Amino acid sequence: MTAPERLADHTTLRLGGPARNWVVATTEAELTAAVTEADAVGTPVLVLGGGSNLVVADEGFEGTVVEVATRGISSDLQGDDPSCGGAMVSVAAGEPWDAFVAHATERGWIGVEALSGIPGAVGATPIQNVGAYGQDVSQTLARVRVWDRVLRGVRTFTNAECRFGYRTSRFKATGFDQWGGRHVVLSVTFQLRQGTLAAPVAYAELARTLGVEVGARAPVTEVREAVLGLRRGKGMVLDPADHDTWSAGSFFTNPVVATADLPEGAPAWPQPDGSVKTSAAWLIEHAGFPKGYGRGNVGLSTKHTLALTNRGGATTAELLGLAREIRDGVRERFGITLVNEPVLVGVDL
């Protein structure tokens, strides 16, 4: 008898117990059929992309995991002539995100280069409006095709209909089950410019690394390499041999608070509604949790306080224990409650 698949073998944290059922979907038809069949009999469904944004219970998942393994990148261009001005590029949900970014950069498709090195699959990016180094997918995303689990049919949402916000969208909303919404992403279409220069650099740290001013442009290949270097320096590029990268990326989102509630000395990015976004990493460090803090098999990355890492042999219970300690410590020190960014499956923070 074949042993059940463990989520630990499919998540970047290397955590999570076995799934009751496991389906690998290599086509859209297989993907929609697997979800529909499970929904028809009331079986819980976990749609799995790259496993980079999941924290799964040690007990595993009492339902069907549908692994999205669809592939394909297509554009409306005939060749790669920069004079065309732009390209509409459609990408299957199961394509690895960084492989797509590399593909785009090589062809001079501009607009996603600052999102280099992010793990996971393309289909996950619109769900939480993935962003880094001054870019997010909502800036270039044209439309998202989904399987609607309620209507049992394919729907297409334009950018405006996706309700993008900071690390959120209409697809992140729960309501169909406790870990996912009614929409299963099938493909994502991006509207990308053509050229050799990247989009204007919007992030100060990246600008300093490139030796340019914020708002200036640099060769797209140089921007990608600079971002990869910055992410490696923070332990945010996956390396199977380096436990410091065994994480779910940033575990907490940067909180948005009233100006009056901003701690003295904390970074502040003004928001349109008059509030300010501040740095979760700053709050964590100033609450007494430095890089490398932890105990036993879990700890903060030695390179970045936002990454909670599995140092080898950890359990989900241990990781969440550390996450609660940090969340509660920040709340006690600053009165601000940090919110987890990864999806929690079968567990609570």
Image (spheres, helix red, strand yellow):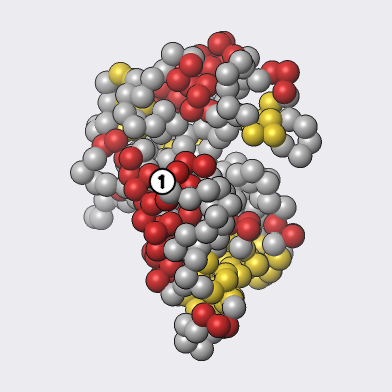
| Residue 52 appears in view | no
Query: Which residue, given by chain and number where applicable, does mark 1 sit on?
Result: 209
Amino acid residing under circle 1? Thr
Front residue of 210 and 30: 210
Q: Residue 191, located in which quarter of the rendered image?
A: bottom right
Relative to residue 67, is residue 309 drawn left or right?
A: left
Task: Name the image quarter holding the N terminus.
Answer: bottom left
Most distant residue in the bottom direction? 78
Q: Residue 232, located in which quarter of the rendered image?
A: top left
Most distant residue in the top direction? 332
Q: Is label 1 in a helix, a strand or a loop? A: helix
Task: Tell me how many marks there are.
Answer: 1
Front residue of 243 and 228: 228
Residue at position x 51%, y 89% in the image: 78
Relative to residue 298, is residue 95 drawn left or right?
A: right
Residue 348 lies, with reference to residue 149, above or below; the image says above
Residue 332 lies, with reference to residue 35, above or below; the image says above
Front residue of 152 and 170: 170
Residue at position x 63%, y 29% in the image: 268
Estimate how packed mark 1 is, as few (under 14), some (14 to 19) or many (20 or more) residues with alpha carbons within 10 Å. few
